[in-house]
Image (spheres, rainbow, N blue to C red):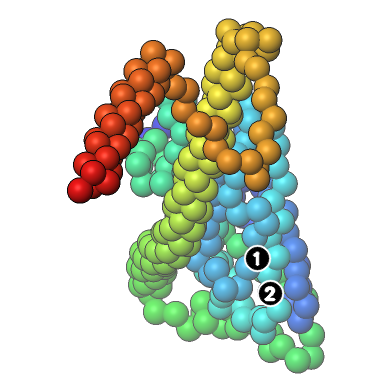
Amino acid sequence: MAKPAQLLNIEPANELKFLGPFRTAVASYMRLTNPTDHDIFFKIKTTAPKKYCVRPNCGLLEPHESQEIAIVLQPFIFDSNEKNKHKFMVQSMVKPDDEEINLEDLWKKYPEKLMDSKLRCVFECPLDSNQPAPVAESATVAAPPNSKQSAAASNDAGAQFANAQFNAMSNEDEQKSEASLLKEVKKLRDNESVLRQENLQLREQIIQLHMQVDGRAKEQSSAATAAKSVPVQSVPVHYQNPYSPPPQLARNPPLELMYTVIAAVVMGIIGILIGKVMYSEGNK
């Protein structure tokens, strides 16, 4: 599948120049411009990631927006043989509109939409007494008749080596980014689980509070209803001495009178019998 046309305008377009001497850090600048009406993600890679510091190395460009990229070359001992070996790659892709996706996962999910541009690094260092003069001319004179073929072969080998470095660098960056993303995802999941537990606890507390409030409201409403239904005057208030004997049960007057008459009759009969006995003993 053919790749899309160039998405970003890159200045400079083909090479990055670094002016020596390289005893201290040297900076070069690249400007990325989005000429389209779409949001475009970009990512910058290099064949020598340990020797450069790129800020920012990735990001999002809105339509017709520009971004300046600072590329800082770390101090090193200049070698003319490494003049064109270091390369940079600018990868770009239109932001998908149908979904939200992580920037690191975007390059893997849509490789057919990925567009890249390569820039080579050029080191310009003035000659001084500590650095030997280049011997390119003498090497050219002493070269055999088939020097053009050997030069072409060396260029092909250099291109293959650069591509291999790009692939190794991208694999290493992807592994590091995947590891960091996994850590971040794990942290986010842990935080999410903690927040969910706290949310559940808060919900349980709120439900308990609602139940308590509803119970108290029902108790108050029932008490108010009972107070309204019973008049205050219909409930007599009696004072009772705690030391007084308990009140006796009410007696039925007819039953009490009948028991009294029966007792009186029995007593009269018993008196008559006792009088007869005493009279008979006296006569003897």
The one of 124 and 200 positioned closer to us in this rendering: 200
Please give the name of the residue rendered at 67% of the width and 84% of the height, measured from the top-left corner: 77
Q: Residue 50: percent from the left, percent from the top?
A: 57, 73
Classify mark 1: helix, strand or loop. strand
**Label 2: which residue?**
74
Q: Residue 164: percent from the left, percent from the top?
A: 37, 65
Q: Residue 134: percent from the left, percent from the top?
A: 64, 82
Which of the labelled discs sits on residue 252, or is there none?
none
Q: Marks 2 and 1: which is nearer the front?
A: 1
Q: Is residue 42 above or below residue 167?
A: above
Name the residue type under label 2. Answer: Gln
Name the residue type under label 1. Answer: Cys
**Label 1: which residue?**
53
Quadrant position of residue 51: bottom right
Does the CB distance between marks 2 and 1 fall below 8 Å?
yes
Classify mark 2: helix, strand or loop. loop
Quadrant position of residue 257: top left
Q: Is residue 197 above or below residue 110?
A: below
